[in-house]
Image (cartoon, helix red, strand yellow):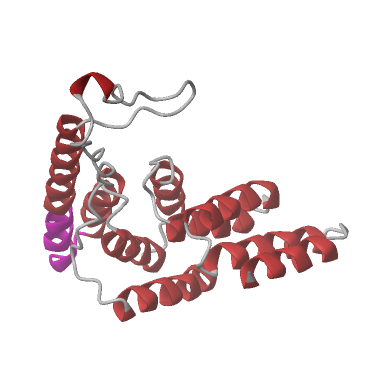
Amino acid sequence: MINMFRNLIMIFTGGLLLAGCSLPADPPAEQTLGLALAGTTHQPVANLDPPTTSKPGEPKKPTPEELEAAEDAKMERRIRSMAHYAAGVAHRERGEHKEAAEEFFQAALIDPTNEKVVMEVVQFLVVSRQKEKLFQLLIKATKDPAAPANIHALLAAAYLERKKPELAKVAAENAIRKAPKLIVGYKSLIQAYRQEAKNGANRTGQMRKTLERAMT
């Protein structure tokens, strides 16, 4: 498992560095509201269209106040996460690896969107051979809707280590859904099919379709 995670970590962190990520990197801003409706200055007031309302079944657009509250909550999580991360670094420098692992664990769990920090925590847990804590982190972190594709791919690898290809395929598909242009999700999915093939299942067609999806 350690070699598998180390290879994945090298791929993910290398991509992050090439993209110019910094620690900590602020996540993208919330998607803003669409353009305001254009005014109709040439029509009488009585003929103006009524305010646009959401159609039945359509999600309600967030208000500016809701967007601001979401940004504040995100910033609060980032601050709490970095406080735990700093405490983990201090423990690590003093050789207190158990305490460092707990602080790093909390840092990644509070803000799984901070991919740079999460990957550093994953690497620390792999090197310190804390496989169970790493698995718990991946399970809990991927419950966050904002968790990035790489975390889902790592969870797929963890499931494969536990000989659970069905769950690995679910995690891999989540990674693909999160980032369809990244190779990590498709790679994880093919690895799950290969494990099933070793157990006697015919997965040639599924692997071919996955490769086709990756190239589209």
Where residue 21 appears, as percent x and y from the top left, is 25, 71
| 143 sits to left or right of 67 | right
Q: Determine the residue positioned at 18% across, 62% down.
A: 24
Q: Main secondary structure of the magenta part?
A: helix
Where residue 7 appears, as percent x and y from the top left, is 49, 75
**Quarter of the image with the C terminus in it:** bottom right
Above or below, 114 against 46 in this view is: below
Give the quarter of the image for residue 207.
Answer: bottom right
**Quarter of the image with the N terminus in it:** bottom right
Of 122 and 142, the residue lying toward us: 142
Of 206 and 193, the residue lying toward us: 206
Q: Write down the region rendered in magenta.
A: 85-96
Above or below, 9 against 157 in this view is: below
Above or below, 41 against 184 in this view is: above
Where residue 209 appears, as percent x and y from the top left, is 75, 64
Q: Is residue 93 magenta?
A: yes
Q: Determine the residue positioned at 20% across, 25% down.
A: 44
| 37 sits to left or right of 205 | left
Q: Is residue 205 magenta?
A: no
Give the quarter of the image for residue 193.
Answer: bottom right
What is the total number of numbered labels drawn onto the structure image? 0
| 167 sits to left or right of 64 | right
Above or below, 5 against 176 in this view is: below
Where residue 180 appears, as percent x and y from the top left, is 53, 61
Q: Determine the residue positioned at 32% across, 50% down.
A: 112
Give the quarter of the image for residue 25.
Answer: bottom left
Q: Determine the residue positioned at 21% across, 50% down.
A: 103
